[in-house]
Image: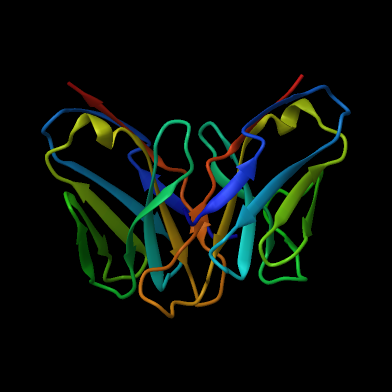
Amino acid sequence: GQQLNQSPQSMFIQEGEDVSMNCTSSSIFNTWLWYKQDPGEGPVLLIALYKAGELTSNGRLTAQFGITRKDSFLNISASIPSDVGIYFCAGQRNYGQNFVFGPGTRLSVLP
Amino acid sequence: NAGVTQTPKFQVLKTGQSMTLQCAQDMNHNSMYWYRQDPGMGLRLIYYSASEGTTDKGEVPNGYNVSRLNKREFSLRLESAAPSQTSVYFCASSELVRFQGLYGYTFGSGTRLTVV
């Protein structure tokens, strides 16, 4: 089946640092989503990307739809303690199909 | 508030017991899903319902059954619970075709199930 890989698996950063993570696949996707899961909660949608090369921001978060359509990137600028959580990417290969989720990147922010 | 509501939030079962996890959404979404989340495994799809009246197996359906009771409700049943089913279960709903800007899955807050 389709698989998404996320890297890094986990990361520890200092408050104020910028963060970069990515999501890759061997298949082409036409939509990418990025979710954040706070401890003890369900994932919440952060950003959606709909076309190759698209760059979209949501506050301190910026995500990009890779031009090959096989990857996506999420950057967080000036991290703060509430950024702690698991970040999931999800891809949809064709409209109307279910999304496939990556295994997540666990972010820890040290004060 | 609009969203996905799951009950119960926590449950402990003995091996062999049965139970039903309830899920309801009030966003008029056509599609609903059940996922399980285990450490290091991400979200794995158990069953989904693309629309009212239909259900399909996902990646890990064994040991589970589902019912799409109506457009709002999608329940997950464990007929004979096993320790391997200890997990956090998430229900989600969605429209899979973008027609009004942002779309994607909306998740409930989860049910933490322990089978002893």
Residue B116's spot in the image, x, y percent?
Answer: 77, 19
- x 47%, y 37%: residue: A41
**Between A64 and A8, the one nearer to me in the picture:** A64
Count of numbered tags: 0
Furthest residue in direction bottom, as rendered: B99
Q: Residue B49 falls in which quadrant of the image? A: bottom right
Judged left or right of residue B76, residue B44 is left
Q: Nearer the viewer, residue A35 or A9?
A: A35
Which residue is found at the position 34% from the left and 70% from the top? A69
Q: Nearer the viewer, residue B16 or B39?
A: B16
Q: Residue at x 74, y 65 (%)?
A: B70
Where residue B25 sits: x, y (%)?
59, 58
Residue A56 percent location from the top left of the image: 22, 64
Which quadrant of the rendered structure holds the N terminus of chain A? bottom right
Left/right of residue A58 with respect to residue B102 in the rendered view: left
Look at the picture and state if A25 lies above or below B20.
Answer: below
Q: Is residue B87 above or below residue B29?
A: above
Quadrant of the frame with the C terminus of chain A: top left
Instruction: Write the residue at 52% across / 58% down.
Output: A100
Relative to residue B98, is residue A17 drawn left or right? left
Picture coordinates of residue B4, whole percent (x, y): 55, 52
Instruction: Residue at the far front: name it.
Output: B1
